[in-house]
């Protein structure tokens, strides 16, 4: 998403780390990516299972595999800097953003729809459709540039 749309706020909420990614009211508050591991819930392991619980699936699998190590699956959640018009040509932190995004398996596109005059918008006004189109176009242009090389 664009700067100041709530990417870091969503990251902090999902990672349950309220201050890992600063969420400030200015563009490019996030420069370096923030990364947090998220546990992968499994329907075969109940939420009350503990890694050392003799009845947990993890413990039974570890016993079968004859290993003392028991680690539930995780994914890495990455919070990146905002993308701006021209990022595919290196504007803003575009190159850094696009390099980080290329390494991801899944992208969550966060679009701002709240209208709060106290929260800066990089284009001066909130327009969800235009904002989404800017990000989508920059991603397509970056892909095209990558393919043409």
Image: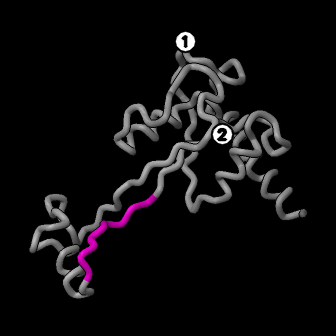
Residue at position x 23%, y 80% in the image: 62
Q: Is residue 17 left or right of residue 89?
A: left
Compared to 117, does 85 lie above or below? below
**Residue, disc 2:** 132
Compared to 80, does 105 lie above or below? below
Q: Is residue 85 left or right of residue 40?
A: right
Which SS type dominates the magenta stretch?
loop
Residue 50 spot, x, y in % from top left: 16, 62
Residue 60 spot, x, y in % from top left: 17, 80
Residue at position x 77%, y 53% in the image: 140
Compared to 106, does 93 lie above or below? above
Quadrant in which the N terminus appears: top right
Say whether marks 2 and 1 touch (CB < 8 Å).
Answer: no
Q: CA distance from mark 2 to mark 1?
A: 21 Å
* Dot in front, 2 or 1: 1
SS at circle 1: loop
Circle number at residue 118: 1
Label 1: how many residues lie within 10 Å, few (<14), some (14-19) or many (20+)? few
SS at circle 2: helix
Q: Which one is in front, 90 or 59?
A: 59
Q: Is residue 121 left or right of residue 87?
A: left
Quick one: which residue is furthest to the right in this view? Answer: 149
Quick one: which residue is furthest to the top in this view? Answer: 118
Q: Which one is in front, 51 or 110?
A: 51
The image quarter containing residue 97 is top right
Magenta span of residues: 67-75
Label 2: how many residues lie within 10 Å, few (<14), some (14-19) or many (20+)? some
Residue at position x 19%, y 83% in the image: 63
Q: Is residue 51 left or right of residue 78?
A: left
Residue 83 spot, x, y in % from top left: 69, 38
Residue at position x 10%, y 74% in the image: 55
> Is residue 69 part of the magenta span, yes or no?
yes
């Amino acid at each position: 998403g664009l700067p100041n749309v709530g990417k870091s706020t969503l990251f902090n909420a999902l990672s349950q780390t309220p201050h890992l990614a600063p969420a400030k009211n200015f563009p490019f508050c996030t420069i370096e990516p923030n990364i947090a591991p998220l546990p992968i819930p499994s329907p075969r392991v109940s939420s009350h299972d503990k890694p050392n619980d003799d009845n947990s699936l993890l413990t039974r699998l570890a016993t079968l595999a004859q290993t003392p190590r028991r680690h539930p699956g995780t994914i890495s959640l990455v919070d990146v800097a905002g993308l701006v018009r021209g990022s595919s040509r290196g504007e803003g932190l575009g190159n850094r953003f696009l390099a980080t995004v290329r390494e991801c398996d899944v992208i969550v596109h966060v679009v701002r729809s709240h209208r709060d005059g106290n929260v800066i918008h990089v284009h001066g006004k909130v327009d969800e459709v235009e904002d989404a189109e800017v990000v989508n176009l920059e991603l397509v242009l970056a892909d095209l540039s990558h393919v043409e090389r």
